[in-house]
């Protein structure tokens, strides 16, 4: 959420930054609400001050025995009380309206972020690995012979509808091995602390990480008010909500492997084949809580953590810096990692790593205090390390053989009891 004081101090800079996201002229509406709210607050305070003066005058009139003056002043006190209550109610309503407005405005792009309207304007930062030369036309994951026995979309459709899958046999063992490998790497090599969190959260947690109120239709809500998390960014980041940390505690670096749930409300007709875009999926998430001075360096470090997973798996990828028009709502700056999928003959997103600055911290009231200083808002960062299902797709497609078998990355062998491949009949060998 934005600092209203910063908007007051420099509305032109605020508008210029949002113009990079395709939004214009928002400061005028915000400042009009702010001025009306401040006016109502001032009027309420003036009415309360008048009550004090009039009450003293009424007491003096009573002491003098001037009943007429006393009654007149009592009436004016009552009028001032009514006015104070009305102005206070108006100020509260305007305050809520201002907050609701600020909650729907995206974060301001960092100056390092390139201008642009959509993914076509993103800037490639680097590539790693070379796409494999196949001696045969590579298939998409769901068409590989050895994968078909372990990837059941028909049963999932009967159970739950479209965009669900039942994984079994060798395929689910590889899926589970990938998640364990990611966690172990982040914990032992990258210094992240593993955290297990709920997948059901209160509304304020979703507001804190900017899923609400703007994107309610993209998530699922239970009948008793809980929300299913679209990512454990929600729970991990909200572990510091309402807290004042000591500077010595920072950075806080966390990782979690959870189920995630997304309605995909705005993606009708996109990626409906296979398991690329599902309503229920698993992700290994990374979240860091830092000081403002270290957040950009932390963003680069987190990007490397995600890249390291792909490199260990031997999966070609590219890293891109998103332009202002393609960034997520809460991000100041984002790196997307795109893995090579030979079945589609293209790179597809497998991780987004974002620095949010104090945007989420302000919504959550998450702060830190340097020695002897006043509390300041922390900076928050999040990123996939990685999306497990999409990594499974990449492993299957890049490792496929002409006979329908799949050679698996060597780093997974210890997690698979020494097995190295999925045979064409779907068994793990």
Image (spheres, rainbow, N blue to C red):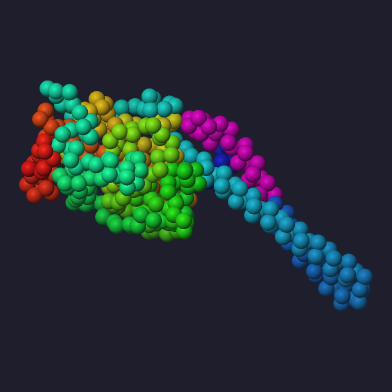
Judged left or right of residue 352, residue 221 is right
415 and 236: which one is in front? 415
Left or right of 59, for residue 269: left
> Which residue corresponds to the image point at 53% horizontal and 32% vertical from the top-left?
23
Q: Looking at the image, which is closer to me, 140 or 293?
A: 140
Q: Position of residue 141 (x, y in %)?
A: 22, 34
Counting labels gives 0
Q: Is residue 216 left or right of residue 230?
A: right
Give above or below for 163 relative to 87.
Answer: above
Q: Position of residue 403 (x, y in %)?
A: 10, 30
Q: Measuring from the top left, give residue 426's x and y in whole percent.
A: 13, 40
Judge by depth and name the residue closer to the eye, 103 or 357. 103
- Specify start and end residues of the magenta stretch as a single range: 14-39
Q: Is residue 373 above or below residue 112?
A: below
Please give the name of the residue rendered at 51% of the width and 34% of the height, measured from the top-left corner: 18
Magenta stretch contains residue 32 = yes
Please identify the quadrant where the C terminus is shown: top left
Query: Which picture quadrant has residue 32?
Result: top right
Judge whether residue 333 can be spotted in this image: yes
Residue 35 magenta: yes
* Residue positioned 62% across, 41% down in the render: 31
From where the camera sits, is residue 290 visible?
no
Residue 308 is drawn in which quadrant? Answer: top left
* Whole-percent x, y for residue 179 in the image: 22, 48
Q: Residue at x 63, y 45 (%)?
A: 34
> What's the magenta bit mostly, secondary-structure-wise?
helix
């Amino acid at each position: 959420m934005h600092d209203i004081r910063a908007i007051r101090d420099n509305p032109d800079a605020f508008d210029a930054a949002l113009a990079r996201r395709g939004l214009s002229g928002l400061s005028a509406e915000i400042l009009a609400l702010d001025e009306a709210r401040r006016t109502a607050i001032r009027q309420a305070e003036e009415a309360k001050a008048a009550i004090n003066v009039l009450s003293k005058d009424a007491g003096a009139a009573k002491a003098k025995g001037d009943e007429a003056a006393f009654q007149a002043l009592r009436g004016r006190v009552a009028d001032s009380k009514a006015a104070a209550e009305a102005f206070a109610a108006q100020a509260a309503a305007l305050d809520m309206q201002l907050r609701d407005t600020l909650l729907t405005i995206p974060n301001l792009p960092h100056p390092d972020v390139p201008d642009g309207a959509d993914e076509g304007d993103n800037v490639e930062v680097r590539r790693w690995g070379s796409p494999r030369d196949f001696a045969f036309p590579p298939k998409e994951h769901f068409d590989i012979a050895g994968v078909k026995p372990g990837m059941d979309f028909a049963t999932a459709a009967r159970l739950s509808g479209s965009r669900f899958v039942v994984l079994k046999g060798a395929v689910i063992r590889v899926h589970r091995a990938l998640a364990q490998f990611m966690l172990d790497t982040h914990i032992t090599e990258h210094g992240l602390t593993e955290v297990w969190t709920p997948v059901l959260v209160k509304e304020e947690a979703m507001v804190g990480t900017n899923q609400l109120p703007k994107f309610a239709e993209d998530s699922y809500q239970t009948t008793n008010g809980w929300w299913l998390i679209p990512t454990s960014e929600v729970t991990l980041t909200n572990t510091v909500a309402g807290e004042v940390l000591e500077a010595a505690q920072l950075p806080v670096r966390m990782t979690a492997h959870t189920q995630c749930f997304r309605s995909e409300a705005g993606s009708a007709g996109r990626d409906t084949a296979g398991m690329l875009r599902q309503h229920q999926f698993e992700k290994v998430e990374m979240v860091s809580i830092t000081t403002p001075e270290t957040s950009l360096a932390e963003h680069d470090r987190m990007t490397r953590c995600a890249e390291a997973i792909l490199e260990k798996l031997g999966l070609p990828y590219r890293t891109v810096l998103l332009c202002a028009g393609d960034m997520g709502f809460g991000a100041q700056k984002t790196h997307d990692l795109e893995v090579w999928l030979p079945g589609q003959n293209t790179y597809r997103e497998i991780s987004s790593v974002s620095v949010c600055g104090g945007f989420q911290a302000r919504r959550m009231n998450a702060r830190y205090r340097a020695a002897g200083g006043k509390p300041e808002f922390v900076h928050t960062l999040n990123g996939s390390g990685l999306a497990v299902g999409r990594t499974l797709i990449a492993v299957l497609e890049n490792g496929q053989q002409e006979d329908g078998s799949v050679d698996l990355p060597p780093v997974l062998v210890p997690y698979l009891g020494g097995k190295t491949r999925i045979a064409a009949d779907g068994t793990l060998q």
